[in-house]
Amino acid sequence: MTSRPDTAATTAPADYFATTRWTVVLSAGHQSSPQAALALEELCRLYWYPLYAYVRHRGHSKADAEDLTQAFFARFLEKNYLAGVRSEKGRFRAFLLAALKHFLANEWDKSRRRKRGGGVTPLALDWQDAESRYHIEPSDDLSPDKLYDRAWAVTLLERVVTRLRDDTVAADKRREFDLLKPFLTMGKGAVPYADAALALGVSEGTARVAVHRLRRRYRELLREEIAQTLADASQVQEELQALFSAFAS
């Protein structure tokens, strides 16, 4: 399980997150838009696993959970679910779960009579990895909704770490990333800079700068990823706190 990070806020211009994947989708409204379709599919590709975990925790078998999740996305990406957006509008996380609940309650019986995917090209999803992840979830004492929130937070953190690693590879600093990665999620003031200096083979002052730079970029990417699922940039900090409250459950 990915650890909860230091979630100290970073300052960004008011319009920094003005255009996000979710705002692109919402701005299209009821009209067909290639950009909105691509943005919605990308969001679904990134955050499909929490839905699979939710369905599994509702008591469905592995095979049925695969069919349900794939059928849901096939229907979701071909049907105008945005027509039902109301209170969940600001957060893609909440909207996606509400759409899944509606699908499970009203449309699964119809969808399972059709070929998986309903004639729509399904998302390419890694079911083996999903089931392996599900079996290590501490889910026994969590409601399906709580497990969904926790799985979403972990998925988001994994995405952030992947982006951060790619940044360091591009800057030819992969070794530095590998050595300093354990310090990313430590609480403020808990970073052992002497250990970082020893690992890097540099002075403690230089190590402090390197750790601070990496942690700052981590927080920036974290807020960027969260913003991509929101319609209002002012909700980033609120959504951050809501997501990580799942780890305290």
Image (cartoon, rainbow, N blue to C red):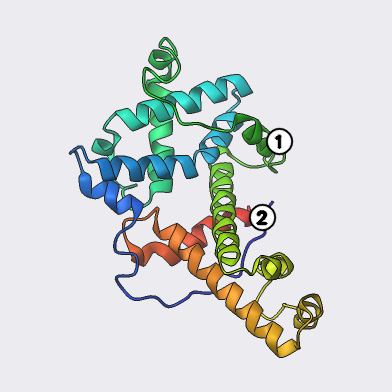
The foreground one among 248 and 56 is 56
Residue 124 is tagged as none
Q: Earlier in the sequence, mark 1 or mark 2?
A: 2
Residue 145 lies, with reference to residue 162, above or below; the image says above
Question: Gap in Å between the C-alphas at discs 1 and 2?
Answer: 15 Å
Name, please, the residue furthest toward the left: 31
The crowding category of the residue bearing disc 1, from other C-alpha atoms within 10 Å (few below 14, some 14 to 19, many at least 20), is: few
Residue 151 lies, with reference to residue 32, above or below; the image says below
Q: Residue 109 sits in which quadrant?
A: top left
* Residue beneath disc 1: 135
Q: Secondary structure at mark 1?
A: helix
- What amino acid type is highlighted by mark number 1? His
- On the question of residue 145 being in view, the answer is yes
- x and y percentages locating residue 127 in the rendered image: 60, 30
- x and y percentages locating residue 191 in the rendered image: 72, 77
Which residue does the image show at 69% across and 35% down from the upper left?
A: 132
- x and y percentages locating residue 17 in the rendered image: 34, 65
- x and y percentages locating residue 146 in the rendered image: 56, 45
Q: Secondary structure at mark 2?
A: loop
Q: Is residue 70 left or right of residue 213?
A: left
The foreground one among 10 and 248 is 10
Which residue does the image show at 36% across and 55% down from the upper left?
A: 230
The foreground one among 134 and 98 is 134
Name, please, the residue furthest toward the top: 113
- What amino acid type is highlighted by mark number 2? Thr
* Residue beneath disc 2: 2
